């Protein structure tokens, strides 16, 4: 009972400290392209959308690998430091006050996206080096629906949706012990289930 009361006191104290800052930043981001509920900005997704577009072009334009090689993971703060986003400094500041119910799943999803891209780059480079365009096509087809699901999930979190996906279903597609899936295996009904 004492432990429960102690934990409850900590939670109340933490909320009492954080809430005024959160409310202040809600007001500050109101006229910017930053969500006032989550204090997150969709501009961060541009970091992934660009490489995702290049990856989809690879089977018909293998030379795109040169641009893809230049892509590296960037934290939310790093992205906005380097961006031309009008309210970049505010975006960086507000991020520190984003509620954990949004920020933690957001960061988890970013980690999955970084991993998926980096692993796919290794696979496509191997196929391009071997001039194996059929397998290159299969690698990209396997990558694309996974990335689409993650980008959609990330956008949903940024826009304040707390229950975007069934995590176990998404984890299935990243389980290295599972049999590798071809792109056609993730049909629309499966994607719908992930967002059910």
Image: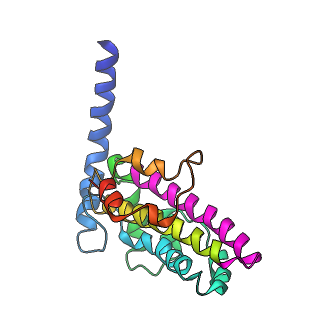
Viewed as shown, does residue 128 lie left or right of 106? right
Q: Position of residue 27 (x, y in %)?
A: 23, 64
The percent position of residue 157, horizontal first and vertical second, equals 33, 58
**For residue 114, side relative to residue 149 (left or right):** right
Quarter of the image where one finds residue 24: bottom left
Position in image of residue 22 (x %, y %): 28, 53
Is 33 on the left or on the right of 115, as rendered?
Answer: left
Check the image and report above or below for 49 versus 62: above
Would you say residue 39 is visible in this rendering?
A: no
Q: Is residue 133 visible?
A: yes
Q: Nearer the viewer, residue 70 or 146?
A: 146
Residue 29 lies, in percent from the top left, at 28, 68
The quarter of the picture where residue 145 lies is: bottom left
Task: Point out the stretch of residues depicted in magenta.
Answer: 104-133
Q: Residue at x 26, y 58 (%)?
A: 160
Q: Quadrant of the N terminus?
A: top left
Q: Could you tell me which residue is drawn at 73 percent across and 79 percent down?
A: 131
- Height in image: 27 above or below 130? above
Name the one closer to the observer, 146 or 41.
146
- Residue at image position (43%, 51%) is 170
């Amino acid at each position: 009972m004492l432990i429960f009361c102690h934990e409850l006191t900590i939670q109340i104290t933490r909320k009492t400290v954080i809430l005024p800052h959160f409310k202040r930043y809600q007001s500050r981001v109101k006229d910017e392209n930053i969500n006032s509920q989550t204090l997150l900005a969709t501009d961060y997704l541009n970091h992934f959308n660009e490489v995702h577009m290049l990856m989809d072009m690879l089977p018909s334009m293998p030379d795109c690998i040169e641009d893809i090689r230049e892509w590296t993971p960037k934290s939310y703060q790093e992205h906005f430091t380097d961006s031309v986003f009008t309210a970049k400094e505010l975006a960086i500041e507000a991020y520190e006050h984003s509620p954990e119910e949004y920020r933690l799943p957001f960061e988890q999803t970013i980690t999955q996206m970084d991993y998926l891209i980096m692993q796919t780059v290794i696979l496509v480079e191997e196929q391009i080096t071997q001039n194996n365009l059929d397998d290159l096509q299969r690698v990209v087809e396997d990558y694309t629906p996974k990335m689409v699901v993650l980008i959609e999930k990330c956008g949903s979190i940024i826009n304040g949706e707390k229950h975007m996906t069934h995590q176990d279903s998404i984890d299935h597609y990243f389980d290295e012990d599972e049999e590798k899936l071809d792109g056609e295996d993730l049909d629309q009904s499966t994607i719908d289930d992930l967002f059910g």
